[in-house]
Image (cartoon, rainbow, N blue to C red):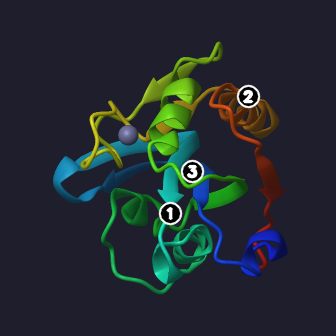
Amino acid sequence: MTPKSIRQTEEKGVYTLLVKVKLDEWIKVGRLGRLRFSGLYAYTGSGVGKGSTSLNGRVSRHLCDEKKTRWHIDYLLRCPSAEVKSLVTSRTEIKSKECEVAYNILSSNGYVTPIDKFGSSDCSCRSHLIHLEGSSRQALQTILKAYKRSGLNPRAVSRRRSS
Ligand SMILES: [Zn+2]
């Protein structure tokens, strides 16, 4: 289920998934090993190519249950107690904006903690997955602010699990 606004075109852009891990979970994340997760996390990535590497392609993959575990985020999202609560996207052709957004979430005022090396194997960021304290609503505001500070125009879509 992909939001209509980004289904139609082969847009290029950056995205952030707000993921809630409902229970306290130890999850094996590839080479990072077993990590403990609980609460809200913001995962930021980009899709600046075509087809499966477009914004739509990337987001659709994250929201699809049937896939091989390839990226760090795949290990987290396949955990039954992990749920994508919201999705924030913005059009851009500049791939490095994903790093800028991740950095701006991390340097925001709230209580934020990076999960070291998560999703940042091919850049020099500390992390692209950031744990956020507080409510889902506060976390979403933190993400939106980070987009604006990165010079981006964010769109947010909230999701409900169909089952
Ligand atoms: Zn980065």
Mark 2 residue's CB less than 8 Å from ligand 1: no
* Residue of label 1: 48
Per the image, the residue denoted by label 2 is 145
Q: Quadrant of the C terminus?
A: bottom right
Q: What crowding class fits label 3: few (fewer than 14 Cα within 10 Å), some (14-19), or many (20 or more)?
A: many
Report how far apart the C-alphas of labels 2 and 1 lie in the structure: 22 Å
For the N terminus, the quadrant is bottom right
Instruction: Determine the residue positioned at 46% across, 25% down.
Output: 113
Q: Is residue 100 left or right of residue 87?
A: left
Q: Earlier in the sequence, mark 1 or mark 3?
A: 3
Q: Amino acid at mark 2?
A: Lys
Q: Residue furthest bottom?
A: 66
Q: Residue at x 54, y 17 (%)?
A: 107
Residue 103, given in percent of the width and then of the height, sits at 48, 27
The kind of residue on which mark 3 rests is: Val
Pair 3/2: label in front: 2
Q: Give the residue number, with chain letter if any, for mark 3.
A: 21
